[in-house]
Image (tube, grey):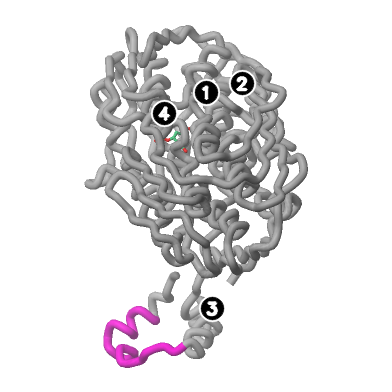
Amino acid sequence: MSINPLFTALFRVGTLRRLILSKAEMLLARRLRVFGVPLLSVEKQLFYRVRPAGRLTGRWRVPGDKSISHRSIMLGAIAEGITEVSGFLEGEDSLATLRAFRDLGVAIEGPQAGEVRIQGVGLRGLRAAKAALDLGNSGTSMRLLTGLLAGQGFASTLIGDASLSRRPMRRVTEPLARMGARIGTSEQGTAPLCLAPAERLEGIDYAMPVPSAQVKSCLLLAGLYAEGRTCVEEPAPTRDHTERMLEAFGKTVERRGNRVCVRGGGGLRACRIEIPADISSAAFFLVGASIAEGSDLTLEHVGINPTRIGVINILRAMGADIEVLNSRQAGGEPVGDLRVRSAPLRGIPIPADQVPLAIDEFPALFIAAACAEGETLLRGAEELRVKESDRIQVMAEGLQRLGIEAEPLPDGIRIRGGSLGAGAVQSHGDHRIAMAFAMGALGAGGAVEIADCANVNTSFPGFVGLARGAGLNIEEQWA
Ligand code: S3P
């Protein structure tokens, strides 16, 4: 909400202090203009209204993998030669990365129907951007770019939206500082991030305190510009798309157990990248089809990298009927078609080793837990509190509003399965919360209204159309 400064001034001097705006007065204030500027402007919000009737059927392909899309632009930009990408996710997050590299002087054609052509400028060919790089809602763009830009000979400033500006960045700026980078943050260790031109980076050996593919990838990208070897040790396996893609670009990556190392210098060779459909987007349909009786749905060409399949493992342990068909390799990543049929689910203690492998899928998995018989307990997942929203708190509140017993814990949640009722929930602008509750309506006794859904476009453009085609009774409304 933004308020005309004149209105604020009048309010401050007391002229309007006693005035309490009723709904009608708010409407009037929105229409009135002072010197052409609306007296009060309230931004519109996107709501989903989902009715419970329906089952999910058909064969569908969800959009391209977000993590791999980001990396294809980043590595394509600093490679020698032309990188051609297919299956690129045309969502706001990966587009923020694409725009950032254009601002850094890279010629990029597309995206058009998922095709992108990047004219690589080589490891040392990026140029200073004229303004701050705005990465919107995208944590992956900000953390990986910080690593990639930390070793450049020019300064950069990275900014993001309100949610991204609250997310912790010391997890990348501290190890980068040990490599010799100079990066300013807010007092809370958040964006804006101000990167000074680097004189020289030095490789480090870093044991990550929390499993994070973003931190690992950030340091490996910085390592390309550092002297000597940069090694990262992870406490548990996390997605390895950066390692796989560096190899596809001809870079040697040493991987032994939970350690991964790269050497600075040497160039990357452009290549073709085929991006599979995003398992994190498929997850909503895996849950929706599991809970909506009579469903039989196939999701085509989904990335099933072993570091991403926690959602399949957890749902199967809950009793879900998911088959992986036609497993194959595409662009250095394993893919398959996922066939899911509805099945009764039961609550489980979620195995600790699956947490990093399903880190983005918990909003959807909590919906599965709410529709399962018995209790589901998640621990060791404090990271969920610092995602696009505090996903433990926001999901617990939403589930409670729909009549489910959900107890937030510092590092997880306890959910007792029951019957979801009708009601209105808040997504707090978190794309995955919005889509999870939309699927929840398939198991609910009445309509579910979800507020603040515009950010679904960050990861899943076309979600509403695809979900409707598959059988979800969903309507959108701006209000
Ligand atoms: C991502 C890694 C994960 C994930 C995020 C994408 C990536 O974050 O939650 O959506 O592309 O590397 P963390 O590494 O912080 O767990």
Give the numbered dot on residue 361.
Answer: none
For the residue marked with disc 1, what is the amino acid? Pro
471, 245: nearer the viewer: 471
> Left or right of 372: which side holds 471?
right
Cβ of mark 4 under 8 A from ligand 1: yes
Query: In the figure, is residue 18 to the left or right of 95?
Result: left
Residue 36 has which mark?
3
Q: Secondary structure at mark 4?
A: helix
Q: Quadrant of ligand 1?
A: top left
Mark 3 vs mark 2: in front: 2
Alpha carbon distance from label 2 to label 1: 8 Å
Circle 4/circle 2 CB separation < 8 Å: no
The quarter of the picture where residue 107 lies is: top right
Comes first in the chain, label 3 or label 4:
3
Is label 1 in contact with label 4 (beta carbons under 8 Å)? Answer: no
Distance between the Cα atoms at labels 3 and 2?
57 Å
Which residue lies at the image location 27% right of the left edge and 48% below the top edge?
410
In this rendering, does residue 152 appear at all? no
Q: Which mark is residue 213?
A: 4
Residue at numbered disc 1 = 306
Q: Which amino acid type corresponds to the residue marked 4 in the rendered image? A: Ala
Q: Amino acid at mark 3?
A: Gly
